[in-house]
Image (tube, grey):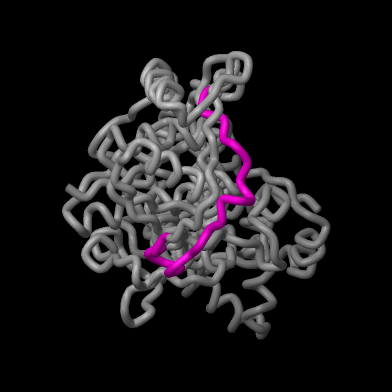
Amino acid sequence: MLKVRFAPSPTGSLHLGSARAALFNFLFAKNKGGKFVLRVEDSDRQRSNKELTAEILEDLCWLGLQWDEGPYFQSERIDLYKKYAENLLNEKKAYLEGEAIIFKVHPQKIKINDLIYGEIEFDTNVIKDQVLMKSDGSPTYNFACVVDDYEMGITHIIRGDDHISNTPKQIMFYQAFGWQIPKFAHIPLIMEAGGGRLSKRYGATAVGEYRQRGYLPEALINYLALLSWAPAGNREIVSLSEMLSKFSLSRINKTKAIFNIDKLNWLNTQYIKESKTEKIARLCVSFLQKDELISDSYDFSHLEKVIDLFKGRLKYLSQISEIAAYFFLPAKIEYSEEAKQKIKKLDKRIWDELIKQWENLDDFSTENIERVCREIIAERGIKGAEIIHPLREALTNMAVGPGLFELISVLGKEKAVERLKCITL
């Protein structure tokens, strides 16, 4: 049976490059009717972290990349690595150097037919003897990796192309044991727009950071898939189920993928816009509560109305606190200097007229709110912008936002009227 594996090391968070490797392994396995194995490479006792392990597994589940086998933990398999290393020692294919077991490298040419890059040739003359087991009793990465892949029946190894240099070292171990060598596919790395590997300096690199910011998993998965791969037709919005049916390694581009946060934000906005309002509202609750804008006894039906106004404007969900705070704040709010200047431009008599008219409305609907404003504009002989812009600033302390009359209706008569009464500039 076809088997692939994703093998994160819990010495750091799950970053975007690793998440994309996990995604491609997952898609390849499911498309071919194979199995997706999860192995945690935590044999580095000093650097491995249990909290990071839990975070990585949680992030994979959040992305929808559920494994078929595992998770296996290298820290629980040390005796197995030691046994295999001693086998090579007994066969004179390795030697002792103090407490460490070292593999003898013999000169040869190694060729692989990489499923993405094609034929690659290596010369082992430039590779020094390889440590199998360190003096502290722990295995090296390349050795433990090969033992695990063999024991777990891994048939295809799909990983970043920064691992190409590890490939000949691992193949030598396969040869020494007489094991069948799996097929390799090396994925181009994700790069920054200006060149160089994606780093914290350029922006968030960990999946958890995007999750905490309020990106939808389906949007992030969609974006990661399009970094080096695309279905026929070069469409940009592709669901996970569609990826599963159409994924193939042959459509992976050999050139480095360039990370573009604007493209990710655009995709996330599309997914938010197309999601049900109820779903987005529930996802926004934690962000609003964290920023102390709503309590545990909030009005969910009101929240849904607010979200409905902003669904097409949110780049990510945590932004809701920034752009819609005025719906949840008390009637009296603080104004920026710019807002104060705009509000001052409107005659106080117009504010008083608005308050009076709104208080008399039994139906505080979008249509009635607009009718009142248009009547005042006509009676006063002023331009619409002369009342609309100051009014928006007065109610929201913002110059832009959703349609003003819809916004006022959702804000509600009581808060809208009270906020205008609180203006003392």
Tell me if residue 124 is in the magenta stretch: yes
> In this rendering, is residue 130 above or below 386?
above
Viewed as shown, does residue 47 lie left or right of 363?
Answer: right
Viewed as shown, does residue 214 lie left or right of 125?
Answer: left
Q: Can the viewer see residue 298 in this picture? A: yes
Residue 205 in picture, x, y percent from top left: 59, 48
Q: Residue at x 56, y 60 (%)?
A: 190
Q: Nearer the viewer, residue 355 or 178?
A: 178
Q: Which residues are magenta?
A: 112-133
Residue 26 in picture, x, y percent from top left: 31, 50
**Image-quadrant location for residue 367:** bottom left
Farthest residue in the front direction? 92
Q: Residue at x 65, y 73 (%)?
A: 387
Residue 140 in picture, x, y percent from top left: 53, 30
Q: Residue at x 42, y 67 (%)?
A: 116
Residue 313 in picture, x, y percent from top left: 51, 64
Tell me if residue 385 is in the magenta stretch: no
Viewed as shown, does residue 169 lie left or right of 422?
Answer: left
**Image-quadrant location for residue 385:** bottom right
